[in-house]
Image: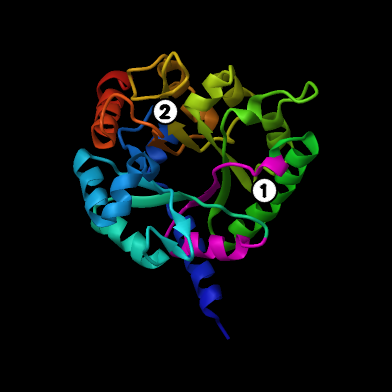
Amino acid sequence: MTTRRDFMRQSALVMAAMPLLNNELLASGRSSKKTGLALYSIRDEMKKDPAAALAKAAAIGFDWVEAADHSDGKFYGFKPREFGKIVKKAGMEAISSHSNIRPENADKMIDEAAEAGMKYIIKPSLPDDWSSTLDGFRRSADFFNEAGEKCRKAGITFGFHNHQIEFREIDGTVPFDLLAENSDPRLVIFELDIAWITAAGKDPVAYFKKFPGRFPVWHMKDLSPEKQDATLGEGIIDFRPILAMSKKAGMEYWFIEQGNCLTHTPMESIAISRRYYLDALLK
């Protein structure tokens, strides 16, 4: 007898086998004209009226979104399938979600992400007891592999999003390197936050070379001299050599993301960032 869970997983596997929207990037090594938005950037508007906020993002020109509110079986108050539909109705695709996935809720969270039509479920950060020692990071990598296998069966992919802490050495070891070396490349990907790896004093390009193909998803975020979020083009990061390595990194999708908009409203910031990408970085 086919259960609802089995049907959902089979459907997700079929969707995962379809060609990626961003095949052009991988085939050519050039950056795509398509753009993504991490909905955390407009979280206040998403809280007030998700459908209206999504419509505004689509009107600016975004093609993909990444959710940042996945709790109690819902995305922004909508059941998974409903959320996927309202994103699609706005003219965009829900590619991924930042979800507080843990050992005790992994099956449920993964099924919900698959039901919403996501390609990725991303763990946005590690709890303190997982990130304070090298043993904690090793346990994290073990969980990544376990979650990655569950995701594979559900037709989606597990990933982890970095902050600065993963690049701060412990006993001569960079924890991010430990995570990458102890996780299965077939099961675990990394969503590289360009701003936070830069703020930590590391070079994104060096990591693309060290772990090629492990970074199919990026957060495109600029950095102020004070190491705060900045709208693209208003910070210190030169994105051109980074984007030139997109094929080496394995990049398929990227999202503009800004936690704190200091010089513009969030909607203004994401519009300026997208325009800077298209007008300046693609030339």
Residue at screen point 39% across, 35% down = 257
Q: Is residue 178 left or right of residue 24?
A: right
Where disc 2 sits, the SS reads: loop
Q: Is residue 112 visible?
A: yes
Q: Is residue 49 left or right of residue 161?
A: left
Residue picked out by circle 1: 144
Q: Is residue 166 above or below residue 126?
A: above
Q: Is residue 17 visible?
A: no
Q: Which of the 4 image quadrants contains residue 135?
A: top right
Q: Dividing the image into 4 quarters, which one contains the C terminus?
A: top left
Q: Nearer the viewer, residue 85 or 103?
A: 103
Q: Which amino acid, mark 2?
A: Lys
Q: Nearer the viewer, residue 98 or 146?
A: 98
Q: Picture coordinates of residue 139 (x, y %)?
A: 76, 45
Residue at screen point 21% across, 45% down = 56
Q: Dividing the image into 4 quarters, which one contains the N terminus?
A: bottom right
Of labels 1 and 2, earlier in sequence is 1
Q: Magenta residues, as a range?
A: 104-130
Residue picked out by circle 2: 221
Q: Picture coordinates of residue 176 (x, y %)?
A: 67, 31
Q: Residues within 10 Å of mark 1 (few under 14, many from 20)?
A: many
Q: Which amino acid, mark 1?
A: Phe
Q: Picture coordinates of residue 264 (x, y %)?
A: 26, 28
Q: Is residue 207 left or right of residue 237?
A: right
Q: Nearer the viewer, residue 136 or 191?
A: 136
Q: Picture coordinates of residue 211 (x, y %)?
A: 63, 29
Q: Residues within 10 Å of mark 2 (few under 14, many from 20)?
A: many
Q: Nearer the viewer, residue 35 or 1?
A: 35
Residue at screen point 23% across, 45% down = 58
Where disc 1 sits, the SS reads: helix
Q: Using the numbered discs, state the Cα–Cα distance from disc 1 to disc 2 in whole angstroms.
A: 25 Å
